[in-house]
Image (tube, rainbow, N blue to C red):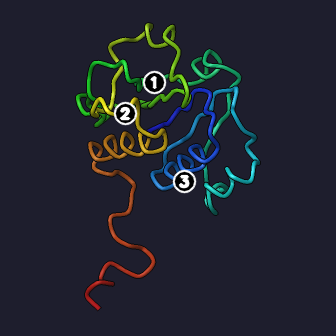
Amino acid sequence: MNHIVLFEPEIPQNTGNIMRTCVATDTKLHLIKPLGFSLDEKHLIRSGVNYIDKLDYCVYENFDDFQSKNPGIYYYFTRYGRKPHTSFDYSNPDGKDLYFIFGKESTGIPKEILKRDLEHCMRIPMTDKVRALNLSNSCAIVIYEALRQQNYHGLLQEEPHKGADYLEK
């Protein structure tokens, strides 16, 4: 199973957008405190639209609490990573849980956490004109790369509401 982990997220709109992406991709969301918002905040709910009730998520007191409850393979996203996110094999033939860990918007993942597993620290390639991409965009880029490598397992590849032949009608 794929998981997105947000370490101390600060902006409710980003988290709301990530929640929607998680519902769309059948990805579990993990939120590590402190959070920069309340989970019932109106901006968060609005960003999550009508899908928040379908979200599979957990909240943790700190990173150690999260780590103690979630065995699997951890991938850390940081602007200091030396490998592109596409250089890893997420096809996951062993069925292990894959955790894609993103830091808070202002400062990222703490260096002391990253230093524990430098082999799994990566970045999304970009120019030197920006410091970082938006958090919710980064999560979407990464989860869809993992799903692409997994042949979009469990996701619909045809439009379910108007039908696969809608454009032909």
From mark 3 to mark 2, how far is it between C-alphas?
25 Å
Q: In the rendered image, which quarter is residue 164 located in?
A: bottom left
Q: Residue furthest bottom?
A: 169
- Report crowding for label 2: few under 14, some 14 to 19, many 20 or more residues within 10 A (C-alpha): few
Q: Is residue 52 left or right of residue 2?
A: right
**Is 58 placed above or below 116 here?**
below
From mark 1 to mark 2, how far is it between C-alphas?
32 Å
Q: Residue furthest left?
A: 87
Number of numbered callouts drawn: 3
Type of residue at label 3? Arg
- Report crowding for label 1: few under 14, some 14 to 19, many 20 or more residues within 10 A (C-alpha): some
Q: In the rendered image, which quarter is residue 162 located in?
A: bottom left
Classify mark 2: helix, strand or loop: loop
Closer to the N terminus: mark 3 or mark 2? 3
User: Residue at point 31% right, 42% down?
Assistant: 145
Q: Which mark is residue 35?
A: none
**Is 128 placed above or below 47 here?**
above
Task: Check the picture and name the quadrant holding the C terminus.
Answer: bottom left
**Towards the viewer: 114 or 153:** 114
User: Residue at point 28% right, 47% down?
Assistant: 148
The residue tagged 3 is 20
Q: In the rendered image, which quarter is residue 63 located in?
A: top right
The residue tagged 2 is 130
Closer to the N terminus: mark 1 or mark 3? 3
From mark 1 to mark 3, how far is it between C-alphas?
23 Å
Q: Which mark is residue 72?
A: 1
- Which of discs 1 and 3 lies nearer the camera? The answer is 3
User: Residue at point 26% right, 42% down?
Assistant: 149
Type of residue at label 1? Gly
Classify mark 3: helix, strand or loop: helix
Task: Check the picture and name the quadrant holding the N terminus.
Answer: top left
- Which of discs 3 and 2 lies nearer the camera? The answer is 2
